[in-house]
Image: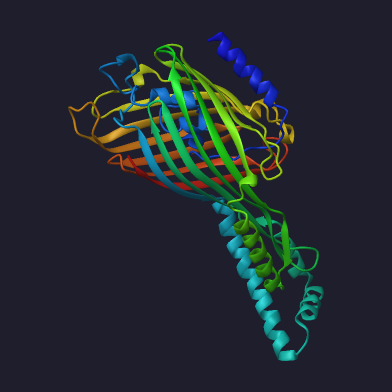
Amino acid sequence: MRKFIAAFLILGFVAAAFAAKAPTHRSMRGESMGNAHVALVDDKEAIYYNYAGLTQINRLGNYKKRPEQGYYPRNFFGDARLNLGGAGPFENYFSTYNVAKDLQKLYQRVHKAAEETGINENDLLMDTLSTHPELVHQINAYDHKYLTMKLKMDAELAVRGFGAAIWVDASVAPYLDGGLVLPFIGVDTFYVDAVIQGGFAVGFTDNFSIGIGAKAAKRHKVEVITVDILNYSSLQDTLNDRYHDAADHIFDSESFSFGLDFGLLYQLTREIRIGASLRDVYFKELAGDKITPNLSVGLNYSPRFFNRNTAYARKFNFACDYADAFNSEKNYKPLSHLNFGLEVEQTLLAWPGYNNEIRALSLRLAGGFKGGYPSAGVGLEILHLVTLEFTTWAEELGYFTGQEEERIYMGEISIGF
């Protein structure tokens, strides 16, 4: 095992010469636990956090064969899921809605007055703002009102020893800016990441396993767009141009980048697992970005006295990760790499006598800290076919943790078995 660890670390240090973030899959379970997941990996999330965890599928929960690890509801087949989710900072939505109403009234009045008097609309607006400086103050109070929106779509398949997924992560951040005189609207960031990946895991002993995966990724980005608020037609033309740029090159093979993921998992005791993963080792730039590989190590603790393997099963996990160790962007401090999380999942309705192999309703509650910011989530699984989840976490927009928080709220529906 020492040879595997040494090779793992050497590969990581070599890969650390790169410099940008890779496509990020938004795992609802992982994000709700502060993204502390590299040693927990007992289901399909192993595809994204640590392929070595694929050896745990249909093993944990098999109480007859492994009573010391029989805490989790067993899935005979594994996981096959289709997921659709969306996210955004909802508090900004509500405040910006009021902003939009105020500005709409102002420009409607200016437009109406321009039609009645025959005065140029821009000149009339300038005169109005110079005559009523309180309006300028009101407009400038709304500088850079972001309306960040995120979308995720996943198709996942995971069985013991193998997992694959196709997923899309997209984000757009339009904003409203008061400007010095004339307000304008713009798009600060817009990207779409599309990824197809797959990998396998091998258990060398009952306690130690490794995993490896390959992926192909495509990224489309749009530079900053700004258009003054009176020129709607140019905004429409600009967006149409960006759309055609993206559509014309969507299947261009030269724009794809290929990479590898590696993972280790070790069952230290019957309650403690440790894990490590080196992910996103890309071989070339992705849409002009040199990718920084993600080296993470972590620990998962699952105390036996909290867990139950009856029909009304319960599982409890506490996880801690040191994540994204190579990322020094934005002057990250060591504590910003620490993630903590815990989860409790309780089966509420089941078919007693089947050792939880048939469950009708399960509730999962989770919480944690991701890089210093709190996270939380709730999930409801119905007949092991439909899962509804809601998660919140925060991302740092500034240069250090605590400077500029963006709180994200994401909901997802998952269908499969």
Estimate the x, y position of residue 283 in percent, counting from the top left: 65, 33
The answer to whether residue 253 is above or below residue 64 is: below
State the residue at coordinates (62%, 66%): 100
Q: Is residue 36 visible?
A: no
Estimate the x, y position of residue 17 in percent, counting from the top left: 73, 28
Estimate the x, y position of residue 229 in percent, counting from the top left: 71, 69
Place residue 285 in its image quadrant: top right
State the residue at coordinates (33%, 14%): 68
Q: Which colour scheme appears in the figure?
A: rainbow
Pick whichever, 261 or 267, lies toward us. 261
Q: Which part of the image, by quadrant, shows the C terminus?
A: top left
Place residue 111 in its image quadrant: bottom right
Q: Is residue 66 left or right of residue 213?
A: left
Q: Is residue 103 left or right of residue 321?
A: right
The answer to whether residue 337 is above or below residue 4 is: below
Place residue 384 in its image quadrant: top left
State the residue at coordinates (39%, 40%): 379
Pick whichever, 408 or 53, lies toward us. 53
- Total marks shown come to 0
Q: Is residue 204 visible?
A: yes
The answer to whether residue 319 is above or below residue 187 is: above
Estimate the x, y position of residue 8 in percent, counting from the top left: 60, 18
